[in-house]
Image: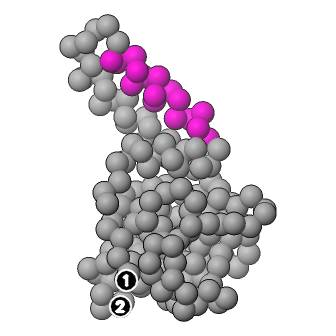
């Protein structure tokens, strides 16, 4: 299911507790549809540009893996050590999220729901994604929704696996 980019951005802003960052873009968009009617088309395009630049956010991330290997994720993938992905409570399956940590970056799909720990984490990385980013404990990461890909049972397989090219597997950078 394709994800509306604006909707994904709004969900990400709410998720990270920075909904206040989205309000200027919403206000600008609302102002452009006011009484001036005919002027709304040219002014609505710049209103969406600031929202795109404000999608960078931070959040607390944990990771999961060994105890869940062999089990199905909420999005239908079988979790293995090689699966690269992230769990999020609200973003749709297949949403692509660029995760950054200490000068490393990885684009991964949302594969599962969570985290459900009581420490207030916003994201739950698969063990493969955590390892690729050099994460071994609970940390603060940067996140940005960069797109979406169709959900499939092979989503999140590493780039070297035969079916990952079709599945929209995780991307470096």
The residue sitting at 51% across, 73% down in the picture is: 74
Residue 3: numbered disc: none
Seen at 74% across and 75% down, the residue is: 137
| Residue displayed at 49% across by 57% down | 91
Q: Is residue 134 left or right of residue 76?
A: right
Residue 111 position in % (x across, y down): 48, 72
Instruction: Verify whether residue 98 appears in magenta.
Output: no
Asked whether disc 2 touches disc 1, contact meaning CB atoms under 8 Å apart, the reply is yes
Where residue 16 appears, as percent x and y from the top left, is 62, 49
Q: Secondary structure at mark 1?
A: loop
Q: Earlier in the sequence, mark 2 or mark 1?
A: 1
Residue 30: quadrant of the picture: top left
The magenta segment is: 18-33
Which-is-in-front pick, marks 2 and 1?
1
Residue under numbered circle 1:
154
Instruction: Tell me which residue sits at (46%, 72%) in the image.
Output: 75
Residue 49 in sight from this viewpoint: yes
User: Residue extending furthest top?
Assistant: 35
Q: Is residue 126 above or below residue 32?
A: below
In the figure, residue 25 lies in which quadrant? top left
Above/below status of 67 relative to 103 = below
Q: Report crowding for label 1: few under 14, some 14 to 19, many 20 or more residues within 10 A (C-alpha).
A: some
């Amino acid at each position: 299911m394709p994800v509306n980019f604006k909707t994904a951005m709004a969900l990400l802003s709410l998720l990270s507790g920075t909904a206040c960052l989205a309000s200027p873009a919403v206000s600008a968009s609302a102002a452009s549809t006011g009484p001036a009617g005919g002027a709304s088309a040219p002014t609505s395009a710049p209103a969406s540009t600031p929202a795109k630049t404000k999608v960078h956010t931070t959040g607390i991330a944990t990771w999961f893996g060994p105890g869940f290997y062999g089990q199905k994720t909420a999005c239908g993938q079988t979790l293995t050590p090689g699966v690269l992905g992230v769990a999020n409570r609200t973003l749709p399956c297949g949403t692509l999220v660029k995760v950054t940590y200490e000068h490393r970056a990885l684009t991964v799909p949302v594969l599962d729901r969570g985290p459900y720990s009581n420490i207030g984490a916003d994201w739950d990385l698969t063990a493969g994604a955590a390892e690729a980013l050099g994460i071994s404990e609970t940390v603060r990461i940067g996140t940005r929704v960069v797109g979406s890909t169709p959900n499939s049972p092979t989503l999140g397989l590493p780039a070297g696996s035969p079916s990952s090219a079709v599945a929209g597997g995780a991307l470096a950078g």
